[in-house]
Image (tube, rainbow, N blue to C red):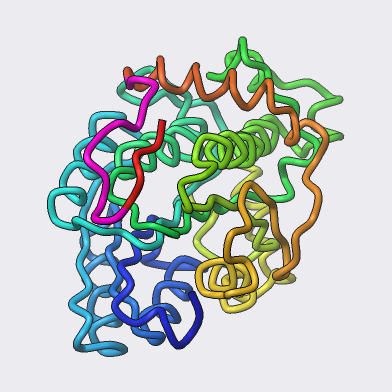
Amino acid sequence: MSDSNMRNKVVVITGATSGIGQIAAEKLAAMGARIVQIARDPVRGSAAIERLRAINPQAAPSIFYADLSRISEMKRVASEIAAAEPRIDLFVNNAGAIFGRRQLTADGLEMTFALNHMAYFVVTHELLHRLSPEARIICTSSDAHETAILDLDDLQSEKAYRWSLPVWLRYGGPGFTVYGRSKLCNILFTRELSRRLRGSGITANCFHPGFVATRFGNRAGGLIQFGVGVAKRFARTPEQGAKTLVYLASSPQVSGVSGKYFHDEHEVQPSKAAQDDAVAAALWQQSLRLANLDNSFSRVPAAGASQVA
């Protein structure tokens, strides 16, 4: 893909009503892509669609609404998109959040884990059969993963939210610890997904956008919300943060590249924990169990796409 051949490509993206997702969606629309968004807020969603229509009136952008903290909603919105879109050329997992205290979803999952990992996992899994040959999957991660270690026996962070002086000094509080683990999950998921897609022509990569002044952290509460707000004064702009996303979406230089982690349009090495393929495989299996999904992608593929097992 490139600026010249993004025309008429179908792009499905989460978290695109603001921040780097919004910028990326608008830039890809300007290249000729048709944008399909998954959003939560109808007011911001309507505004996002109007901006896309103004950029590319012929492309007919669309939007689907869902609460991506709930597994039933993840499955529902994926099913609706699959019914409406027989072919998807680019899928971007970008929605995410950070929280200052432990909260559980309706499914009993810790909220950060549900939004930042399970939504990536479930919606991707349920849309794989609609991906076209040479489609690209992109996941927004973060360098917050670098100090994280994934405890497969504590995915719901019952232990991680316990306050202690070492946690505060090293991570800035348990909310940052849990967020970092979720971003580690993004990289592990991308690696395992890439392995499972090997030979299909479909690629999966993730990236660190840098610390960007977006809506991120605005509703985290407590010290996290205050600290993030102060830090945003020195943060990158959404335009700067979106550059690597757009690069991974459109550049011919990454055609065929899969399972990698990028920053500033360059491949970089993630942490040692993020390169643990055994943990990546175990996380995949636990995610399947939590979402009550089977372990195959053997559904009717998009036109010309190969079956992936």
Nearer the observer, 29 or 97: 29
Residue 275, visible in the rendered structure: yes
Q: Is residue 171 left or right of residue 25?
A: right
Q: Is residue 85 left or right of residue 143?
A: left
Total numbered circles: 0
Quarter of the view holding residue 270: top right
Q: Is residue 269 left or right of residue 309?
A: right
Q: Is residue 213 left or right of residue 268?
A: left
Q: Residue at x 67, y 17 (%)?
A: 151
Q: Position of residue 193 (x, y in %)?
A: 52, 38
Q: Quadrant of the C terminus?
A: top left
Q: Residue at x 51, y 34 (%)?
A: 196
Q: Main secondary structure of the magenta part?
A: loop
The region drawn magenta spans 293-304
Q: Position of residue 224 (x, y in %)?
A: 64, 45
Quarter of the view holding residue 210: bottom right
Q: Position of residue 39 (x, y in %)?
A: 30, 56
303 drawn magenta: yes
Residue 220, visible in the rendered structure: no
Q: Is residue 200 above or below residue 109?
A: below
Q: Position of residue 281 (x, y in %)?
A: 59, 23
Q: Residue at x 63, y 35 (%)?
A: 188
Nearer the observer, 47 or 22: 22
Q: Is residue 155 above or below residue 185?
A: above
42 drawn magenta: no
Q: Residue at x 48, y 74 (%)?
A: 1
